[in-house]
Image: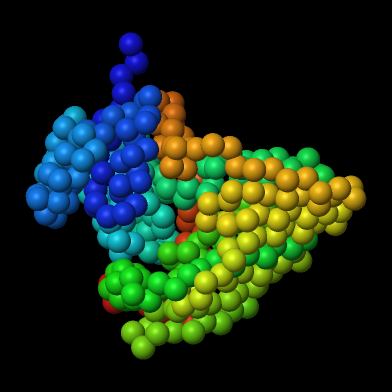
Amino acid sequence: MKTKLNIAILGLGGIARKMAATVKESENAVLYAAASRSIEKAEAFAKEFGAEKAYGSYEEMAADESVDLVYIATPHAFHAENAVMCLENGKHVLVEKPLAVNAEQAERVFSLAERKGLFAGEAMWSRFQPIQKTINEIIKSGRIGEVTQVTAFTGGEMTNVKRLTEPELAGGALLDVGIYPLNFASMAINEPVARIDTNAELSEKGVDLQNAFILTYESGKMAVLGSSMVSEMDSKGVIYGTEGRIEAEFIIDIFRITVYADGKKEITERPPQTTGFEYELEAAIKAIERGDTQTEEMPHGETVKMLGIMDELRKRWGVRYPFE
């Protein structure tokens, strides 16, 4: 009989609850442990989701030899250090996006994972969705011709969310939601970026409240992107080609795409899903079973590439976090 992987969740906020519900429905994994800085919170979480172990210390959980894979769901600023700690303890890691605050941190995580032969992946869930794979296939088929431009914006009013307003927590719209249009564009135009034009509005504390940026690729193709934590945006993405276009509704979690090509309009709805996190979880499990250190959907190079672009954007805006 195939053995299920023991999953531990490190950091028990709202996103962790979604992953816990996902693991409970998995045929290939079991929720083994919950870890928080508060033992009371860990025990309550473990009881609610049926985890065997509850830890009031991240380090104590990482030392548990029964843990196979750790899902890291702490604030952005702590992702890399938490991942390094788990890897050093021989644990595979699936890290909530962004995997790190900057490209240098990500390279450190991946270098350690490669040396130890452990899986380390970014839980950029939009990359793993079946409907995103449908988009990729449409582009590859040539139905909309050659892709020439992408537009995508996302955001909402989130100025009351502490982890987004504080520089020491790596706050700002870009790392939290701007990462979605950036990844959406990168999947449609997989080329080196030759030029970046950008601007942002910063808060009094120095994090980006809203931003806009244009990426011009080496071929001349362009992506017009942006994100906000002060405005409710439609979160729509459009991929324009020489013979048609693809419109994706709500790029954070695409629920419908409409293809305009050959004088026709074709709508595809998202297939039924548990939470939407099941795809990234199963991809990580399969990679671990194969002995791979990364997934095909979100390879290490793409994570580093996305963070490198965001590093440059923040540099242009003058956004630097205290711990960098």
Res 118 visible: no
Residues 259 and 288: in front is 259
* Point 33% across, 84% down: residue: 205
Image coordinates for residue 130, horizontal then vertical, percent: 58, 39
Q: Splitting the image into 4 quarters, where does residue 222 fall? A: bottom right
Q: Is residue 194 above or below residue 282?
A: below
| Residue found farthest to the top | 1
Identify the image's colour scheme: rainbow, by chain, secondary structure or one colour. rainbow
Determine the residue located farthest toward the bottom in the rendered image: 204
At x 44%, y 33%, the residue is: 282
**Total count of labels:** 0
- In the image, residue 3 above or below residue 48: above
Direction from residue 50 to residue 262 in the image, left or right: right
**Nearest the eye: 308 or 167:** 167
Quarter of the figure that contains the N terminus: top left
Locate residue 106, reporting x and y percent. 39, 56
x 9%, y 50%: residue: 40
Q: Position of residue 52 (x, y in %)?
A: 16, 32
Q: Position of residue 142 (x, y in %)?
A: 81, 44
User: Which residue is depicted at the point 43% across and 61% down?
Assistant: 103
Q: Is residue 68 above or below residue 74?
A: above
Tell me which corner region of the image, top left, top right, bottom left or bottom right, holds residue 117: top left
- Which quadrant would the C terminus be assigned to in this image? bottom left
Q: Is residue 173 visible?
A: yes
Seen in the picture, residue 68 relative to 160 is either above or below; the reply is above
The one of 67 and 111 positioned closer to us in this rendering: 67
Instruction: Depth check: give the residue in front, 241 or 131.
Output: 131
